[in-house]
Image (cartoon, helix red, strand yellow):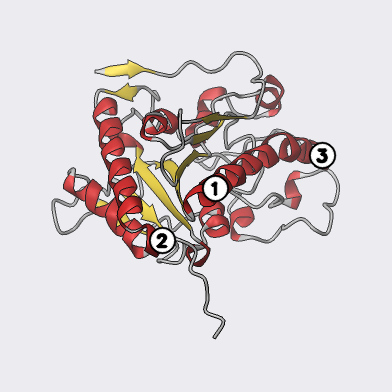
Amino acid sequence: MSLGPQPLKPVTPASPIEVLEPAKLSLPLVFASPHSGSYYPPDFVAASALELGALRKSEDCYVDELFADVPALGAPLLRALYPRAYLDVNRESYELDPEMFDHPLPAFVNTTSPRVAAGLGTIARIVASRREIYRGKLSFAEAERRIDGVYKPYHQALRRLINQAWAQFGFCILVDCHSMPSTGLPVDADKDGRSIDIVLGDRGGMSCAPSVTDTVEASLTELGYRVTRNTPYAGGFTTQHYGEPANGVHTIQIEINRNIYMDEVTLQRRSGFGKLKSHLNVMAERVAALATQQHHDLRYQRLSAE
């Protein structure tokens, strides 16, 4: 049974982001969904060489819905409303491929990162199927318009939410929520050789306390999921930029195999969507319990003056 695809937003949203706030902030947790946006501006679609269905292959469909209950637990959820094919907020602000633009780019632009080389910069050159997005060249003014209008508001909101939790509790656990295609994933050789269900990225233990990753992994494993760490996804810009355990900001990336909850061809939800959503709520509750039990260890570690 499928539950049908989410209808795309027909009108320009008033804001490029949405923050689902709890009635009362009672947990030092922030959840973010940077790639589930589904508003495709008509001028963007018109400038693309691809049909809308192909553009949506890069979208983390419904991930924001999977985590939509966390405000009821006492934590906010930030979600981007524009898709990553339009502007990827999980990148540096200016990671741009010079071959995509009609004039040379300013010197401050990062044109040589591995993500740019892969065609997946702040403004992507290709979609997940490796097909070229644009039929022509872009102007740098267009890139700046997207960065100013979408990228900066997202990160301003994310920083505000992190600072808010840090100020109230002395630390913050940021959960960066993603989905991944089912093809090309590692398999669980110790069991039945099926693909991994969930990949946790903590930059090899650098972006959050081990207890955070251990808790997420244990809770999901107990619920029956095949979980691995940092392969093939160790964490993106958000994990690297915001994860500072010594300063009390712990960031973990969660990548969910799309085949668990949706049809990757039709983009329709599968019948297991609700079950996965409830399991992610259990995981969030376990992380919340950890935050309560180990708040002294997770807080900013002040160095002695001696």
Residue displayed at 14% across by 51% down: 192
Q: Specify the farthest residue to the bottom.
A: 306
Q: Which residue is mark 1?
A: 162
Residue 61 seen in render: no
Kindly check if marks 3 and 2 are in contact, taking CB atoms under 8 A apart as contact. Answer: no
Q: Which residue is mark 3?
A: 139
Q: Position of residue 233 (x, y in %)?
A: 42, 55
Circle 1 SS class: helix
- Where residue 264 sits, quadrant-wise, is top left
Kindly check if marks 2 and 1 are in contact, taking CB atoms under 8 A apart as contact. Answer: no
Q: Which corner quadrant holds the N terminus?
A: top left
Between 116 and 51, the one nearer to me in the picture: 116
The earlier-in-sequence mark between 2 and 1 is 1
Label 2 to label 1: alpha-carbon separation: 14 Å
Q: Which residue is mark 2?
A: 298
Examine the rendered structure and indicate whether residue 155 appears above or below residue 267: below
- Where residue 46 sits, quadrant-wise, is top right
Circle 2 SS class: helix
Label 3 to label 2: alpha-carbon separation: 45 Å
Circle 3 SS class: loop
Q: Specify the farthest residue to the left.
A: 191
Q: Amino acid at mark 2?
A: Leu
Q: Specify the farthest residue to the front.
A: 306
Residue 47 seen in render: yes
Label 1 to label 3: alpha-carbon separation: 34 Å
Q: Amino acid at mark 1?
A: Ile
